[in-house]
Image: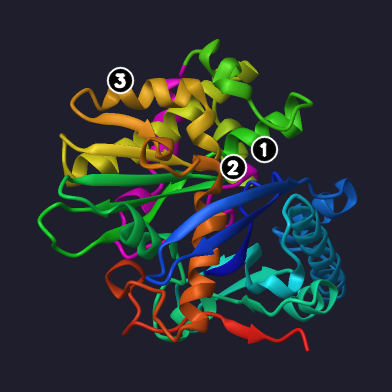
Amino acid sequence: MTYLIGLMSGTSMDGVDAALVQFDDHGQPTLLEQHTLELPAPLLIELHRLCRPGNDEIDRLGRADRALAQVFAEACHNLLAKTKLNASDISAIGSHGQTVRHMPDGHHAFTLQLGCPNTLAALTGIDVIADFRRKDIALGGQGAPLVPAFHQALFRSNADRAIVNIGGISNITWLPSDGSEVLGYDTGPGNTLMDAWCRDHLNCSYDKDGALAASGLVNDALLERLLSHPYFSQPAPKSTGRELFNSVWLQGHLHSLPAMADNDILATLLATTVISICDCISHHSNHTEVYLCGGGAFNAELVRQMRQRLPHSNVRSTEALGLDPQWVESTAFAWLAYRHINGLSGNLPAVTGASREAILGGFYPSG
């Protein structure tokens, strides 16, 4: 048996998820233990600032890179403290890092994740695999989404399935039952716009169960404007982030409309997420198994509206497939690290647009 740790800090920045994953001799993963660690408030504020252009960015970025690695290391120590394993038992840490800029298009496309892997390796005494996305971009790909390869390995079956990860940004993996090519792409905003509105206007970090959105009314004029973003009609391969879907973009639309209640805005933002996801699912099939993961899987109103828009599909969480929806992504990055140390590719060119399959990530030894 081989043990790896997967670390994930997503677009929502709601904490660091650390997953202890055991791999059998065939490379099949089993989630053994998990731990979530909140980001310290000053670091969280700084990371949000770094997601927007600003002053003195290089110095600030360098300090945040080291500080975040220290939080990652603490999450690993806390995770191992829950088990009977020591650092010496762990083959590697697969660290996604924290994305602060994702610009996958253009002549010099790039993506940037923080969480210094050298610092993480030094503090934990465990080898680290990190920087998974930039090899795919170097090969002409989007560098995202990377989880479809994991979804294919773990969840493909003899039924059509859509795996939808709803984090800050949402992505879909289409797993056709006929054995044809797996597809995947970012569908657009997940929780990021709703969470930002809650933080900036309602003094809370998120809309628990979608209760505030459920109490509001969708503003059709705002909804139409949001869904008119060209990203939604752009063909795949495609990926996105806060660079497109952010508070500045939202405020630009709100300023040209009559004032509306906070709950109505949340209702409209939730509808934007639901419609953009469901339109993508319907593009592939109106009769399919839909499995949700990420924070959005716990938003009762979001799930209710998805079921309403997909009446002929069975919408459930990945819990039904044996993996808690909160831990799919962190387990995926443990899996990508396992692929790296075994010399196996981790990307799907049909998903990212890369010119070929490749071993993803860089190796950062602890010694």
Q: Which residue is mark 2?
A: 192
Q: Amino acid at mark 3?
A: Gln
Q: Are marks 1 and 2 in contact (CB under 8 Å)?
A: yes
Identify the residue at the far bottom of this view.
Answer: 367
What kind of element bears circle 1? helix
Which residues lie in the magenta part?
Answer: 218-247
The reply, left or right, for residue 292 in relation to residue 162 is: right
Q: Is residue 31 above or below residue 146?
A: above
Q: Is residue 279 above or below residue 346?
A: above
The reply, left or right, for residue 72 in relation to residue 171 is: right
Does residue 272 show up? yes
Identify the residue at the far top of this view.
Answer: 215
Q: Earlier along the polypeptide chain: callout 3 or callout 2?
A: 2
Q: Amino acid at mark 2?
A: Thr
Q: Is residue 259 above or below residue 123?
A: above
Q: Which residue is mark 1?
A: 196
Does residue 235 show up? no
Name which residue lies at 13% across and 61% down. Answer: 179
Query: What's the distance in space between the residues labelled 1 and 3, CA to CA?
Result: 26 Å
Residue 66 in the image: state x and y as whole percent: 84, 71
Q: Residues within 10 Å of mark 1 (few under 14, many from 20)?
A: some
Residue closer to the observer: 338 or 84:
84
Q: Amino acid at mark 1?
A: Ala
Q: Which residue is mark 3?
A: 308
**Quarter of the rendering occupied by the C terminus:** bottom right
Residue 69 in the image: state x and y as whole percent: 79, 68
